């Protein structure tokens, strides 16, 4: 397994809304960590926002997981220019 540096901070906006601030590398093991954190948040909250502003790198598996999370109802709140370009290229 590939080790990656990823930090996810969960913040309750209100009773029904959660924000996950994602920082660092969404690659390797981090892809599964992000997926699990978002699935848990979606199970507890009606609305989940993913703040990807501080993501410095995302691999193709990470892009696929973010798209799956969007399909399950998560909303992207912010991205860096690099992440946005990678999301569009896939």
Image (tube, helix red, strand yellow):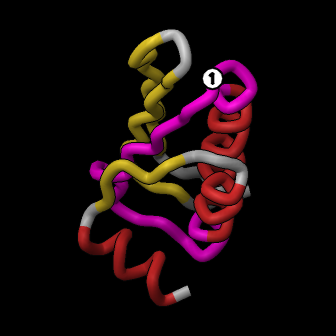
Q: Quadrant of the N terminus?
A: bottom right
Q: Is residue 74 magenta?
A: no
Would you place residue 27 above or below residue 89 in this image?
above
Q: Position of residue 59 (x, y in %)?
A: 55, 71
Number of other residues with Cα within 10 Å of mark 1, as a class: few under 14, some 14 to 19, many 20 or more: some
Would you place residue 33 above or below residue 75 in this image?
above
Residue at 64% across, 47% down: 73
Left or right: where 50 falls relative to 73: left
How many numbered tags mark residues here?
1
Q: Secondary structure at mark 1?
A: loop
Would you place residue 57 above or below residue 17 in this image?
below
Q: Can you tell which quarter of the image residue 19 is in?
A: top left
The residue most toward the left is 81
The answer to which of 63 and 14 lies nearer the viewer is: 14
The answer to which of 11 and 45 lies nearer the viewer is: 45
Q: Quadrant of the C terminus?
A: bottom right
Q: Position of residue 40 (x, y in %)?
A: 71, 27
Q: Is residue 43 magenta?
A: yes
The residue most toward the top is 15
Q: Position of residue 28 (x, y in %)?
A: 64, 59
Q: Can you tell which quarter of the image residue 11 is in?
A: top left
The answer to which of 6 and 44 lies nearer the viewer is: 44
Residue at 69% across, 19% down: 44
Q: Badge 1 is on which residue?
A: 45
The residue most toward the bottom is 89
Q: Which residues are magenta?
A: 41-63
Residue at 66% across, 53% down: 69
Q: Position of residue 22 (x, y in %)?
A: 42, 42
Left or right: where 9 falls relative to 40: left
Residue at 52% across, 56% down: 26
Left or right: where 26 falls relative to 34: left
């Amino acid at each position: 397994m590939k080790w990656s540096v990823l930090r996810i901070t969960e913040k309750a906006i209100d009773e029904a809304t959660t924000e996950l601030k994602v920082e660092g590398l969404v690659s390797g093991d981090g892809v599964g960590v992000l997926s699990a954190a978002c699935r848990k948040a979606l199970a507890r909250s009606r609305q989940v926002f993913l703040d990807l502003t501080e993501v410095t790198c995302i691999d193709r598996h990470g892009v696929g997981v973010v798209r799956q999370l969007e399909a399950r109802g998560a909303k992207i709140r912010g991205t860096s220019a690099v992440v946005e370009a990678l999301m569009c290229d896939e």
